[in-house]
Image (cartoon, helix red, strand yellow):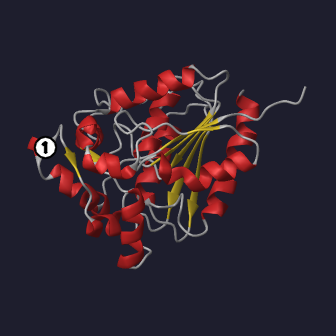
Amino acid sequence: MTATKTPIVLIHGLWMTPKSWDTWAAYFEARGHRVIRPGWPGIDDREVADIRDNPAALAGVGLRQIVDHYERIIRELPEKPIIIGHSFGGLITQMLADRDLGVAYVGVTPGQPAGITTLPPSTLRTGFPILSNPFGRNGVKPISKGHFHFTFGNDLSRAASDEIWEEQAVPSYNRVFFEGVAGAFDEKGGVSHVGYAKTDRAPLLVVAGEIDHVVPPAIATAIVKKYRATGSPSLVDYREFAGRTHRIVSQDGWEEVAAYVLDWATSHAEVSA
């Protein structure tokens, strides 16, 4: 019997839906992998236009609820998958790694877990529209076209960025953003806590984009440094790609990043399975 390839679970980030993975999903599937890319609770398999018009299901949803949602889905699979998350999805990936749910993990420009206090000015600017209103903690907020241009489309003209906004952008889960930022300063009690010193975690790769405004390399390298400083034997690798923004999974040249991630994940998953 021919062995089947390891399934891959893709986890999208804030302001996005599973549609943001169209490029990588097709790439992985063409190479024989089953790809599972569920939406966050409230997004599920809904269309972008419907979410914009009816965002109430996103209100009050927090990180633990999202992580539990993915855990239920993953535990129903016949085997442990490779888990790849982008942005806040990369933080969720790290939290799932704490639950031993994958054979390899990749955080693509990932959000930082609790205890990583590195917050460059560009990162704070991306969160300002949400964080500036603490009374909206459990609400939802659309991302404006201008803010999307700074956050995701900083390599593009405004017109080209606006086209992607029309196709992909949805309102934020405000609670997730507040929990992520608050957790940065509460390593032990933060919602986004992970066991940096965990000794039996499957290999983790952190990918950064050189010109990413949301998760610049300073955050990505701080995450890697935090894991490695514990002395844990669990492998944590790092790769930075020149000229890449937070839209790294669909930006021109995305194939190079997808190929690197797949090669890394499959080679290390074989060791860890």
Mark 1: few, some, or many residues within 10 Å (few <14, many ≥20)?
Answer: some
Residue 235: quadrant of the picture: top right
Instruction: Please name whichever residue, 183 or 150, is drawn nearer the observer in this view of the structure.
Output: 150
Image quadrant holding the C terminus, namely top right
Kindly identify the residue that appears in the image at 31 percent across and 58 percent down: 123
Q: Is residue 219 above or below residue 98?
A: below
Label 1 amino acid? Answer: Gly
Q: Position of residue 260 (x, y in %)?
A: 68, 55
From what the image shows, is residue 171 above or below residue 139? below
Relative to 70, is 273 on the left or the right? Answer: right
- Residue 73: x, y in percent? 52, 25
Circle 1 residue: 136
**Of helix, strand and loop, which one carries label 1?**
helix
- The image shows residue 144 at horizontal and vertical percentages of 25, 63
**Residue visible at 76% across and 35% down in the picture:** 5
Taking the spot 67% from the left edge, 34% from the top edge, the residue there is 7
Q: Tell whether 59 sits left or right of 268.
A: left
Q: Residue at the location (18% across, 50% down)?
A: 131
